[in-house]
Amino acid sequence: MSGRPAEPLYLQRRSYRMRRVIDACRLLPFLGGLLWLIPLLWPQGGEAAFPTSRAVLYMFGVWAVLIALGALISSWLPRGEEAEDSAASPAAPVRRAEDAP
Amino acid sequence: MSALNLLIAVSAGYVLVLFIVAWGAERAAARGRGGWVRAPIVYTLSLSVYCTAWTFYGAVGYAARSGLEFVTIYLGPTLVMLGWWIVLRKLVRIGRRNNITSIADLVSSRFGKSNTLAVGVTLIAVIGTTPYIALQLQSIALSFGAFSGGFTGAPAEEVDVSQVAAWSALGLALFTIVFGTRRLNVNERHHGVVMAIAVEAVVKLVALLAVGVFVVWGLSGGVTGTLARIDASAIGQWQMQSPRWVGITFLSAAAFLCLPRMFHVLVVENEDESFLRTASWAFPAYLMLMSLFVVPIAVVGLDLMPAGANPDLFVLTLPLSQGREGLAVLAFIGGFSSATSMVIVAAIAVSTMVSNHVVMPIFLRTSGTGALVSGDVRAAVLITRRFSIAGVVGLGYVYYALSTGGAALAQIGLISFSGAVQVLPAMLGGLFWRGANRRGAIAGLSCGFAVWTYALFLPSFGAGVVFSEALIETGPWGVTLLRPQALFGIAGLDPLLHGLFWSLALNVGAFVVVSLATFPQPLERLQGAQFVNVFQQTGGRVDLAGRSAQSEDLMVMAQRILGTDEALALFRGAAQAQGLAGFLPEPDAQFLERLERALAGSVGGATAHAMVSQITGGASVSVEDLMAVADETAQIMEYSSRLEAQSEELTRTARQLRSANQKLTRLSVQKDAFLSQISHELRTPMTSIRSFSDIMRAAPEMSTAERAEFAGIIHAEAERLSRLLDDLLDLSVLENGQVNLNLREGRLADVLAQASAAAALGEDGKRLEVVVAAGDVTLNTDLDRLGQVFINLISNARKYCRVAAPRLDIRAWTEADGRVMIDFVDNGEGIARDLQDVMFEKFSRDSDQKAGGAGLGLAICRQIMARLGGTIEYLPGRAGAAFRIILPQTASVAAA
């Protein structure tokens, strides 16, 4: 968000940013799912078995990070009218009038 | 005071507090100043009905048995909340837009307001919820039982746990009825209930955290000690069944969306879409805190409690065994909160479905007159809803009593989840896929529900209860492919995952295949577009001409469902929007839709639709009309473009018609003029013939000279008559095409010379100077007829050219294509504009009658030229009168 004077090519800089924030929000659960699949790779049983205490720390660590990311992204996400514009119709960056038929 | 009496007193006091909180919230909301009631944090906390007593107590037991696997129950909802923009946002938007009252209402509304679907989803909800309510009652009873050992030092008492469960069920039903059916709301929101649930959410979190803190810092010596203790315990090594880890995470995520109570708090009770923004991270945080101390409590419980102790009650028994009665009571209250909040919300959600989709349609049908039943429908709705609540809770109690507690109930949680999840394909399909249709949804739900019942629900009662051991082992009638827990020969799977996989796979398969293969009804397509494209809509809608609906009937019905004040406000608003005074708006499509949505908030989409369409005479027809109108519009647009293309041609034709009309009018005038003219022309010679012959008869003594003179006059007049008649005859012959052409070859110049010799000098001695420039053109045609034309033109020029030295220029040449052009141009004043059109018609002649003639000359000329395969036309804009003759060099025989 530097104040560069360059004219944006396709979208208003702000709209573009909003879209990417929405993308991030959409991707967040997949990131979480991936991170929580990692425990399935840990060694099980026998001497090399993974201690539960570390598993607990890992699980809750990931949880805390996801919550923090979620809070951050949510605060950036477009609100109200803006949300309609940024998310509703990717093809039409122009705001629709409320009284459009 | 005995431990049990204390517990009863604490529970009663706690319930009283909840009553006060709920009542205060209702009052504040009713007065419109309950900002704190409608806060994102309240919404977030209300989502905690997800954490039931099963998770409050059960999670520790789960952890004690299977280690960290319990956490998957919370991972699913966490992921769904974090990705709220994908599904939840759309779900909430649709729910708010259409006044959705339950998940059954959502599915039914999406698929053409089908009541069959609504009943199906309701059935699944009831079957899935009943054991779950039983589970809550059991947990309350068990937690009471845990205190039966009494506090340390107190004498032991016998507790009749089933009595506890009965009283709990009664109290819960009462609370739910009081706060769940206070009003019949347009938006179906219960501020009091939501507030109470939020308070309970805080209580159970605090209780669990308190026990956790006590365990970690009070019993294990801090974090490090706890971690060491975890590793040293029976669950100290990481052990995980990968399919269950993934499968239960998915199951909990799906159930989070589909469980009736979750749908109720997530969508129906949602005040504001933006609350999701806060809940998206705050609710995962809540879940994380709820599960934070589960493993430590389980580990310490396993360590400290006697070997036979029920790990499901560690939360309660651990503090109790350590002499922390206060903490134990707090934990008890936490568990109590979990159980009650679940039962209350589930009862509201399921009873709404039952009353809207099962009882009300039957009530409306049996009451005969349909929507216009006498009496207050609101009262009927509220009563059915109260009875439904009592019924749902009662059913839960009956289930509990029959199952006599024990292991059968404990595993019902996840099975109940799997049942609720059967709605997921139809719901998500309906939200994101416009091609999804009602038949597909019904097929998918039926398949999923059937497989779930067969492979999960019925076997869950244990071998020998519903299914015999033999049936589970070898399949029905010995068909091993149909063994309930090893369908299609795939054995060895975890029974839960096995059932979940097959039920969902067949569910999705049937849903997709049937949707692809069948065609939806118009209303389904309309709803599908509205749901899937909910973010693209700005509220605009195709307007449909008013039906035969009676606004007054609608008003009567609306009053009975919405209440008088709300109905009046709604109708007045609509009337004002239409620019009408008073309370009765025109029943146009927009108003009907608005009314239907308002009614849907009270009685569900399908019922509202049925009621309105009963009065309006079938709104489903109106949707078809709407489609027809759309088709017509497309056709009209096509027409209009075609018409536009044609309009120019039409204008041209109109112009031609106008000029033809003018010509006809002139012809008619001319004919009238001619009739008097011809009678005059015939009469004049006849008169002189008659008078001279009379004179000759009456005077026999007449001299010879006189006789000769008179006879000459009679002869001349007779000749004039016969010439006139000849011309008429000639013309008639030519027009009838009976003329025989005498084709021969000759030079044009010769014909012209003869013609000018014959016609240039008039009887009156007037002489026309004829200048011929014909070149050397040879013709093969009827030269006599052609000469007749030339004579006519030349004598016309002589007669009408009124200048001192009349002169006619004749010029002839041959075109490249073999046609011969001959121009006759005189130096007179030309022919008047209005005569140019008609001068080739019969009996047309210059108004100046000095020249004489019957006006047949040019008509004859035109006929002759047509016979010769050529034309004669007037050339306007020359110095004088100018005619052009065009004829082929060789007249074809066909032309003859």
Image: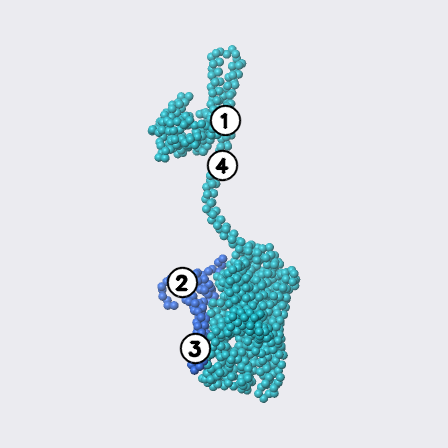
Task: Give the amino acid at mark 3.
Answer: Trp
Task: Give the amino acid at mark 1.
Answer: Gln
Crowding at dot 1, Cα within 10 Å, few <14 / some 14-19 / many 20+, comes out as: some
Crowding at dot 3, Cα within 10 Å, few <14 / some 14-19 / many 20+, comes out as: some
Residue at which label 3 appears: A42
Residue at which label 2 appears: A11
Q: Earlier in the sequence, mark 4 or mark 1?
A: 4
In the image shown, does B804 or B227 lie closer to the viewer?
B227
User: Measured from the top left, where is residue B714 in percent x and y?
Assistant: 49, 18
In the image shown, does A37 or B604 lie closer to the viewer?
A37
Task: Give the amino acid at mark 2.
Answer: Leu
Q: Closer to us: mark 3 or mark 4?
A: 3
Residue at which label 1 appears: B677
Q: CA distance from mark 3 to mark 2?
A: 45 Å
Q: CA distance from mark 4 to mark 2?
A: 64 Å
Q: Residue placed at 57% from the left, 81% from the top?
A: B143
Identify the subunit bearing mark 3: A
Instruction: Identify the element where label 3 is drawn.
Output: loop
Crowding at dot 4, Cα within 10 Å, few <14 / some 14-19 / many 20+, comes out as: few
Q: Are marks 4 and 2 on the same chain?
A: no
Identify the subunit bearing mark 1: B
Q: Residue placed at 52% from the left, 15% from the top?
A: B695
Q: How many marks?
A: 4
Residue at which label 4 appears: B661
Instruction: Identify the element where label 2 is drawn.
Output: loop
User: Measured from the top left, where is residue B782 in percent x and y?
Assistant: 41, 27
Identify the subunit bearing mark 2: A
Q: Earlier in the sequence, mark 3 or mark 2?
A: 2
